[in-house]
Amino acid sequence: MKHNILVVDDDADDRHSIVSSFKTDNFEVTSVENGEQAFSAIFTQQFTERAFDLLITDVEMPLIGGVELVELLCYEKIWLPTIVVSGSIRPQVREHLTSYENLNFMAKPINEVELLNKVKMLLYRRAHTL
């Protein structure tokens, strides 16, 4: 079974780096540049066979940032395991985000092995709690 992952980052190099971490056949990866595009993709695909299993998002982005994206998804009652990535995250933002379930943090630059382990752990948890 393939897992659908959505990667959101306005930096093309960071986005490519994250996407290239998922080279195996077990992952189908979609990438977009900002939270607005991400929300649209998640919302339109949530009840289809291509619904996303996991979200990886940057914090600082134009239009809708990662924090606002997480809040929008919660408001719409779309529960999606999420990894928030950032080169630097303010302590108050991190504290605010820790109130959301299934949310994890990773610092940039991304360590590929650590990312894959975290993704596998979140997908395992999701499969065993649904």
Image (cartoon, rainbow, N blue to C red):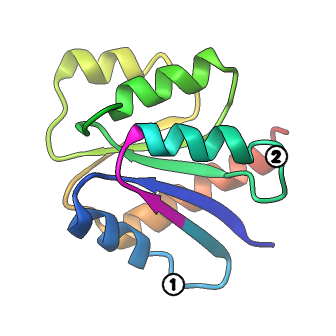
What residue does disc 1 label? 23
**Crowd tier of the residue under label 1, counting other residues whose Cα lies within 10 Å: few below 14, some 14–19, many 20 or above:** few
- Estimate the x, y position of residue 109 in percent, counting from the top left: 19, 61
User: What kind of element bears circle 1?
Assistant: loop
Q: Which residues are magenta?
A: 30-35
In the rendered image, residue 33 lying in the magenta stretch gets the answer: yes
* Quarter-of-image position of residue 80: top right
- Estimate the x, y position of residue 127 in percent, counting from the top left: 79, 50
Q: In the rendered view, would you say 47 is above or below 90?
A: below
**Crowd tier of the residue under label 2, counting other residues whose Cα lies within 10 Å: few below 14, some 14–19, many 20 or above:** few
Q: Is residue 89 left or right of residue 1?
A: left
Q: How much space separates mark 2 and mark 1, taking CA atoms?
A: 24 Å
User: What kind of element bears circle 2?
Assistant: loop
In the rendered image, residue 3 lying in the magenta stretch gets the answer: no
- Estimate the x, y position of residue 128 in percent, counting from the top left: 82, 46
* Rendered image: mark on residue 128: 2
